[in-house]
Amino acid sequence: MTIKEVLFTENSLNQIEEFLQNHKKGTEFGGALVGYQKGEVLIITHASSPGKSAKMTYSSIEFDKEHVTKFCNDINKKSDYMLYFLGDWHTHPSKNLNPSQKDIKAIKKLANYFPLEFRENILMVIVSQYDIKHLKTYILTSNKNLKETSHSTIVDPNWIEEFI
């Protein structure tokens, strides 16, 4: 099933904004995205930081795998497996929010770790370092291309409050 829209809860955007406020500009920054799928929509409920051992440069980021895996697994278990890893978010230090060749290569590599039936729903979000309102969402398609997808913000559903 092809994803047609991405919804960010207020919680997920607040987490990203808080991480960005505490990060010095000039290098890429980001983390994992957790949430759930409802039909053709992905709902993002949580966002992680990259972790203390992340490697960040002007044109790339390598997450601390142990940190983001633990973040995703903890929420997954706490939510009784209703919330799970959906993809990642990262910044670009320029105004260009289009995926770089490194971004495309990274998401294709990530797809190899997903079961075949979920490879079309891997999310990549690219955020401006200077204003969280400027972001683009992309879904990996069945032919291994990134397709820009519409997105909007929703109020936190009441039931996720216990997982925040």
Image: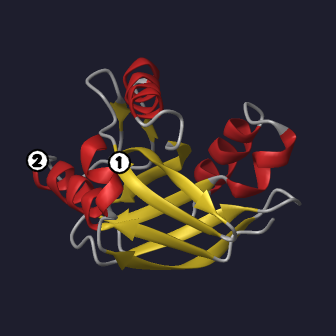
In the picture shown, does residue 70 fall above or below 37? Answer: above
For the point 61% across and 77% down, which residue is it?
Answer: 149
Where 73 falls versus 29 (above or below)?
above
Q: Residue at x 29, y 73 (%)?
A: 155
Q: Say which of 42 and 87 sits in front.
A: 42
Residues under numbered marks 1 and 2 in contact, where contact means CB atoms less than 8 Å apart: no
Dot 1: within a 10 Å radius of its alpha carbon, few (fewer than 14), some, or many (20 or more) residues? many
Check disc 2: other Cα within 10 Å, few if <14, some if 14-19, many if 20+: few
Residue 127, image x, y percentages: 37, 65
Q: Which residue is mark 1?
A: 47
Residue 45, percent from left and from top: 38, 55
Q: CA distance from mark 1 to mark 2?
A: 15 Å
Residue 135 lies left or right of residue 14; in this view the side is right
The quadrant of the rendering that contains the N terminus is bottom right
Mark nearest the camera among 1 and 2 is: 1
Which x, y percent locates residue 15? 23, 53
**Which secondary structure, mark 1?**
strand
Q: Earlier in the sequence, mark 1 or mark 2?
A: 2
Mark 2, secondary structure of its residue: loop
Nearest the camera: 160 or 9? 160
- What kind of residue is marked 2? Asn
How many marks can you see? 2
Query: With respect to residue 155, does 83 lie above or below?
Result: above
> Which amino acid does the dot numbered 1 rest on?
Ala
Residue 131 in the image, given as x and y percentages of width and height: 23, 73
Numbered badge on residue 22: 2
| Residue at the extreme front of the image, as rendered | 159
Q: How is the image coloured?
A: secondary structure
